[in-house]
Image (cartoon, coloured by chain):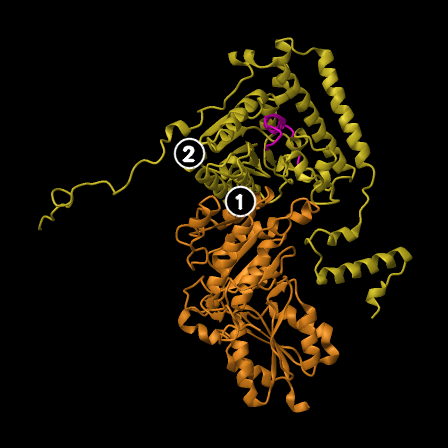
Chain colours: A yellow, B orange
Amino acid sequence: MAVLEQPGTTDHPNTPPPDWHPRTDPDPLLPERAPYRVLGTPTASRLDPALLRRLYAELVRGRRYNRQATALTQQGRLAVYPSSTGQEACQIAAALALDPQDWLFPSYRDTLAVVARGVEPLEALTLLRGDWHNGYDPHIHRVAPLCTPLATQLPHAVGLAHAARLKGDDTVALALVGDGGTSEGDFHEALNFAAVWQAPVVFLVQNNGFAISVPLEKQSAAPSFAHKAVGYGMPGRLVDGNDAPAVYEVLIEALRRARSGGGPTLIEAVTYRIDAHTNADDATRYREQAEVERWRAHDPIALLERELRDRTLIDDEGIREAEAAAEAMAAKLRDEMNTDPVLDPMELFEHVYAERTTQLAEQAAQLSAELDAEEEGSPYPESQER
Amino acid sequence: MSTVTAPSATSIGRKPSTMAQALSRALRDAMAADPAVHVLGEDVGTLGGVFRITDGLAKEFGADRVTDTPLAEAGILGTAVGMAMYGLRPVVEMQFDAFAYPSLEQLISHVARMRNRTRGALPLPITIRVPYGGGIGGVEHHSDSSEAYYLHTPGLHVVTPATVADAYGLLHSAIASDDPVVFLEPKRLYWSKADWSADAPQEVLPLGRAAVRRTGSSATLITYGPSLPVCLEAAELAVAEGWDLEVVDLRSLMPFDDETVCTSVRRTGRAVVVHESSGFGGAGAEIAARVTERCFHHLEAPVLRVAGFDIPYPPPMLERHHLPSADRILDTVARLQWEEN
């Protein structure tokens, strides 16, 4: 048998591809190997007492909000409510880290972040109450509408941040997404655009363990969601999502980096969805109660309370005050929700276009006639009697 | 009246231009007039777009305003949403009709609804330019007529020019609109010429107004975009058959100009809708229904349609059998129950 001449020895030297060079050193982009924590570590002692007290009050309020909203579904006052009990720390600490000129892009489970940003508790529930698709003017607190199709709000955050940067404004966009949302194409496209454009945007993945019923291991084989950052050329951070000051610190750092032209960051906050997906879901069908109990023992409010008590930054009276404030918020929300909203069906045609088309004008006239007939008690609206 | 053929020597200050040039000029003028206008898409910067519609814009306005994006249509439209939320007026280019499909979720779930969702607080003045339609010998995925998908989405304007002058005027109005506009550019008319110059005073074209391209009394051909030239050709051939056909160019499918269409049909008493996209569930079905609902007592015959077959778009060597031809239009006109008169 003839010996084939081996290529690459003399005539074909082993040269690298032309113009190839390493583009980004991946090492500095890698997230920490275990979630970053502050509470219960020596670094906790340098935390600002005022910040800790504020976080605590907001977390207590957030938990009460979740409980109240879930109760409102049982009373038929809300169509549905996706509770974020257990995730109070990552939602609220992230929102509180923002500056006034920043924008928040929430998904449907992020009502607590929206409220922490300053939106009225009642207005944050409009979508889920069902009187309109969004209840607040996004410009007032710079909060985009709660977004239902998963991850589709992420490119919006990138575009807004990019536009702000082009205008020379000091604005950063914070985009919230869940572990399930990371599987969507828009997650990938948003991160890629953000990194290529060096847009001032921060992505926060709240990894709460489940996409409705589907657990983490069926969602992703990545070392962590934070590791995905490296593939896009941005830094990834991994943080204990139940450690409110840790989340706050990591967010502040990422926001500062974005604000100073350093580009986007992907943060994964490891947390847990204590309640079912929504009031309509039955979590016992897909997870063990023992798992829930392990996470209850790592409760964001309890962790923070322990720190506050250990450092005598709060006493029983302080805790009662926080709880009373939360109770007052819940009572007000309950009262507001128990009043039927005043709806004008004609508004359905109001905001479709800047100017009503002739087609919509005709349809508005039809509905108007139907409403008149309803008022007069006739089953046959005049417009139908042709 | 401008047509896609036969430049008129009488119009002063005008010279032959292509539709591509008119579109290009409309973009340039819009960018010069309003710093909020940004262009983004695949290859729109250095290359000037695969059809060269954005040629020269990056050089004139810089890479910050004319952006070569990563190759991801949902990302392009999704980021345009955020840019519009921050006060910009993005003009997005989708490279080809069928390549726009990944952006449909952003379009349907956000672009079309944001104004409504936020009770008018977040209008999205985005123009989405989509080269569409066949007749250019394109390989698969380069010849789709996608207008029906857009038409079925409330909150969008859907506009398509058929003449050089309209290409300029309609794109100008689309960019100026505070609502999202899907601007469908008939690929095979990119190189059509008319005596038109951007330096001459331009007619402002409000969206939602159809144009009568040829007046006639026997029947009305209702068409738009890429099918206008073939309708005009059919109308000329019809003269020999004794039919004097009126040709209505819709220009805007949404809003729909019922008035111009119905005024014509009530006068002629017969109507044929012509488009190259598949007939079933297509724009022609809606148009035929609207005409029937509004002009029933004036009609001498059912409203007929000439459309592409209900097949995936054919390979280029067979596409001529799919696209409405003048002969097919005349055959259809012949079926408008003339014998009963």
User: Which residue lies under the disc numbered 2?
Assistant: A230
Residue B260 in which image quadrant: bottom right
| Residue linked to disc 1 | B79
Which chain does the numbered disc 2 sit on?
Answer: A
Residue A209 visible in the shown view = no
Q: Which residue is drawn at 64% across and 88% down?
A: B338
Find residue B78 and report its horizontal and vertical position in percent: 54, 46
Task: List x then y, in percent, for residue A222.
Answer: 44, 35
Q: Is residue A321 above or below residue A386?
A: above
Task: Determine whether the residue tagged by mark 1 lies in a helix, strand or loop.
Answer: helix
Give left or right: position of A161 versus B119: left
Q: In this view, does B246 lie to the left or right of A328?
A: left
- The magenta stretch spans residue A344: no
Q: Which amino acid does label 2 sit on?
A: Val
Residue A342, relative to residue A96: is it above or below?
A: below
Stretch in magenta: A82-102
- On the image, the x and y values in percent for residue A177 come to 56, 36
Q: Report the Cα–Cα distance between label 1 and label 2.
A: 21 Å
Are dots 1 and 2 on a single chain? no
**For residue A324, which quarter of the picture?**
top right
Q: Report the number of numbered marks.
A: 2
Q: Which amino acid does label 1 sit on?
A: Thr
Q: Which of B330 and B213 is in front in this view?
A: B213
**Marks 1 and 2 close (CB-CB < 8 Å):** no
Q: Is residue A88 magenta-colored?
A: yes
Quick check: B236 above or below B57? below
